[in-house]
Image (cartoon, rainbow, N blue to C red):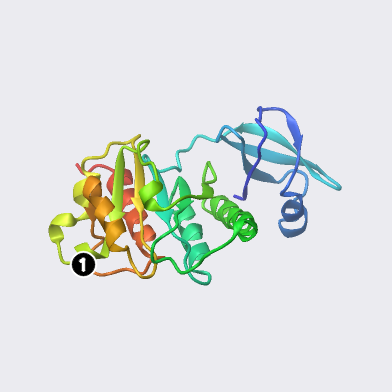
Amino acid sequence: MQRYFTDEELTAGAVYMSGTDTHHMKNVMRFKPGQEFHMVDINRTAFLCEVTETDDHVYYRVVSAVEESPELPVRTSIFCPLLKGEKFEWMIQKSTELGAFDFHIFEADRGIVKLDGKKRAKRLERYGKVIREAGEQSRRNMLPHINFGKALKNTDFGAFDAVIFAYEGNVGNPAAGLERVLGTIRPGDSIALVFGPEGGFSDNEAGLMERFHSVRLGARILRAETAPLYALSAISHHFEQPASH
């Protein structure tokens, strides 16, 4: 079922007018009165809605709340520098589908892509659209926020229960497996997953790992855009698989 997001607080039984999704609802989905869809409100609650009227906008009635839990049991933040070409967009799209909570773009020592303030604003607008479409497609109950941050040495990780560096230097060290760290984390915790650029972490950045968890992501070195997806998949498997009997 098609899903949208609104900044309003929805109430069962009330009728609302479509906002930013009007074009998609009218011209792509071609909604007619009586058709149903899901709308997620500002409180991250999904509602079953029914179209009541279409003219310049789409009017819909909120039928009932939808009981579901599509979010990861742990709040997982992705720290990653910009990547070349379309790699970064692809990464945030797939990471949104896999349950990332938010994205922090940091200035890596070996980062290749550099943007000024104006270009950053345009990129954030574009990235927001990518995230929104991925959140709708994957039936999320929230849209991850994305922002530009600082260099790792100036980043405050104090709000996180665990900080995990995916370091290519650990590829030959089975003792640095991600699963070991995940075993120390509990549902409800917040995790910072830190990934390097195409050229990997610098020696200075690698030195920061001494205070945190430095892990390997399997026995192979992954591309910068693939590593976050591996980690999110491992987190999903660890926390969302039903217990065996």
Q: Which quadrant holds residue 125?
A: bottom right
Total number of numbered discs in the rendering: 1
| Rendered location of residue 99, percent (x, y) | 44, 49
> Does residue 5 appear in this view?
yes
Density class for disc 1 (Cα within 10 Å; few <14, some 14-19, many ≥20) is few
| Rendered location of residue 7, percent (x, y) | 66, 37
Residue furthest right as drawn: 55
Would you say 217 lies left or right of 29 here?
A: left
Seen in the picture, residue 62 relative to 150 is either above or below; the reply is above
Q: What element carries label 1?
A: loop
Q: Nearer the viewer, residue 76 or 36?
A: 76
Q: What residue appears at the point 59 percent right and 55 percent down from the top-left corner?
A: 124
Seen in the picture, residue 17 relative to 105 is either above or below; the reply is above
Q: What residue appears at the point 62 percent right and 61 percent down from the top-left corner?
A: 119
| Rendered location of residue 86, percent (x, y) | 53, 69
Q: Which of 206 and 174 is in front in this view?
A: 206
Amino acid on which disc 1 is placed: Ala
Q: What residue appears at the point 53 percent right and 63 percent down from the top-left corner?
A: 89
The residue at which mark 1 appears reads as: 219
Would you say 29 lies left or right of 40 here?
A: right
| Rendered location of residue 11, percent (x, y) | 66, 27
> Does residue 178 appear in this view?
no
Q: What residue appears at the point 39 percent right and 65 percent down from the top-left corner?
A: 197
Q: Which of 96 and 114 is in front in this view?
A: 114
